């Protein structure tokens, strides 16, 4: 990878998330045939907006936050991707996340391009009033590039349906009419979809069951370790537990708990809801050294926290036979190579966690038609799409003797670049 592809200001820590994405594109390029002439399209975001987000704090002072909205590619449809509020948000991260959304949407064949947004802020330092003012100001600043047919934000790290309601209302007030389809992940009462809250975790579970079947692993009695116990990891853990698996380890941002015979996931969720972390949970043993989590003896490992968690430093410790990437970009390319050599099956994020955007697509469709489906219908459609996407990627991986990640990128990049070629260049 040439250094000029990654501007120095985007790489404060090594190659950064954008650098990881570029390396993934370099790895898939030899498999793209004649479409490779368009590959630079995938290495350059279509549009990146950096905005100042000033608010008045409750004490009367003025605070400024930096916000981003990046539209990576819109060849197959409007941009689609979440908005995160986190103190470590960077342009490199948002660019990479938007690009992974392009790949993810194409991999599961929903008619979206990729986009992502974020504000560099620790939301725990804001009151509810300050959080609402920041959200509304950010929405007003990015208002010029979002819309139901342009770019549709959704919840992500530290954002939820309440934040989406504020974003939808702000956009609608500026427009002069209600535009429920401008965001997804909204409250049900504002045009949200049943099943959306659980969609990402459910998708991880569905794909995990498919992968386990391919590896000859029975979910009944399978040992599962989960990093991240929020909307993705927590729901995936519950579904695995309900299916008869044993969740033997859980790690969140504050601590790690393990139990050889299996953790009571429902009890742990209740504890986290009350205390905000797995720390202090009496139904499992606390582990002081966070790094020990990666060496837990398990069949299935679900990294469902943040990106770049599995690196060459810890990949060698992993004992799992399957890794389900619930988070975006949790495994670096170098760690991917180590895991491949160890015979670990890595189900990439662009397939494993695509349940969220799939049900977001369902929500968007329902908003346009003002006709809403039952939760059973949502879950059935989600399961079918996830199974079909996994099957097509698995088949291609077998045919070309490549990893599931490379196969997923081949499928997705081919779809995106075919659309780019068919549309041509204007003017």
Image (cartoon, rainbow, N blue to C red):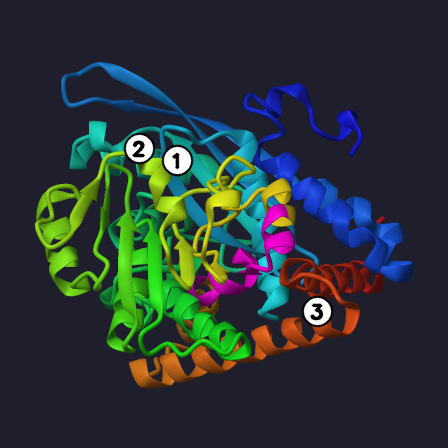
Residue at 63% over, 41% down: 334
What is the quadrant of the N terminus in the image?
top right
Q: Which of marks 3 and 2 is nearer the N terminus?
A: 2
In the image: residue 38, left or right of residue 297: right
Residue 72 in view here = no
Residue 310 at what x, y percent from top left? Answer: 49, 43
* Picture quadrant where residue 30 is located: bottom right
Q: How far, Cα to Cα, is label 3 from label 2?
A: 45 Å
Q: Are marks 2 and 1 in contact (CB under 8 Å)?
A: yes
Report helix, strand or loop for mark 3.
helix
Q: What stretch is highlighted in magenta?
A: 338-356
Residue 60 in the image: above or below residue 392: above
Identify the residue under disc 1. 138
Question: Which-is-in-front pick, marks 3 and 2?
Answer: 3
Identify the residue under disc 3. 397
Question: Which-is-in-front pick, marks 3 and 1?
Answer: 3
Q: Which of marks 3 and 1 is nearer the N terminus?
A: 1
Mark 3 closeness class: few <14, some 14–19, many ≥20 residues within 10 Å: some
Residue 86 in the image: above or below residue 72: above
């Amino acid at each position: 990878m040439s250094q000029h592809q990654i501007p120095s200001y985007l790489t404060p820590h090594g190659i950064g998330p954008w650098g990881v994405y570029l390396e993934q594109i370099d790895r898939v390029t030899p498999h793209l045939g004649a479409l490779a002439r368009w590959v630079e399209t995938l290495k350059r975001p279509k549009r990146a907006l950096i905005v100042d987000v000033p608010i008045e704090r409750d004490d009367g002072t003025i605070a400024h936050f930096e916000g981003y909205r990046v539209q990576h590619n819109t060849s197959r449809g409007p941009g689609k991707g979440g908005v995160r509020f986190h103190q470590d948000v960077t342009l490199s991260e948002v660019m990479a996340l938007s690009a992974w959304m392009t790949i993810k949407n194409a991999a599961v064949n929903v008619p979206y391009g990729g986009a992502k947004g974020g504000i560099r802020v620790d939301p725990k330092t804001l009151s509810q009033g300050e959080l609402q003012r920041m959200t509304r100001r950010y929405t007003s600043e990015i208002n010029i590039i979002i819309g139901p047919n342009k770019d549709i934000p959704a919840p992500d790290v530290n954002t939820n349906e309440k934040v989406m309601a504020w974003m939808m209302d702000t956009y609608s007030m500026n427009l002069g009419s209600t535009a429920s389809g401008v965001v997804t992940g909204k409250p049900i009462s504002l045009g949200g979809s049943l099943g959306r809250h659980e969609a990402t975790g459910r998708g991880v579970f569905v794909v995990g069951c498919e992968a386990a079947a391919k590896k000859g692993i029975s979910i009944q009695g399978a040992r599962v370790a989960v990093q991240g116990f929020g909307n993705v990891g927590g729901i995936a853990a519950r579904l695995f537990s309900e299916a008869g698996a044993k969740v033997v380890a859980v790690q969140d941002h504050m601590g790690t708990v393990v139990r050889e015979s299996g953790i009571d996931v429902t009890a742990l969720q209740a504890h986290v809801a009350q205390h905000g972390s797995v720390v202090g949970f009496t139904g499992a043993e606390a582990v002081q050294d966070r790094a020990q989590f990666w060496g837990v003896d398990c069949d299935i490992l679900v990294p469902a926290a943040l990106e770049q968690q599995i690196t060459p430093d810890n990949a060698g410790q992993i004992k799992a036979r399957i890794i389900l990437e619930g988070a975006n970009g949790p495994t670096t390319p170098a760690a991917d190579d180590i895991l491949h050599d160890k015979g670990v099956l890595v189900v990439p994020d662009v397939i494993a966690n695509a349940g969220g955007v799939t049900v977001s697509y369902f929500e968007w469709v329902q908003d346009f038609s003002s006709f809403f489906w039952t939760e059973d219908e949502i879950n059935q459609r989600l399961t079918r799409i996830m199974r079909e996407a996994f099957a097509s990627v698995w088949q291609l991986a077998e045919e070309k003797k490549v990893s599931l990640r490379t196969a997923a990128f081949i499928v997705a990049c081919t779809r995106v670049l075919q659309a780019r070629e068919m549309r041509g260049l204007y003017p």
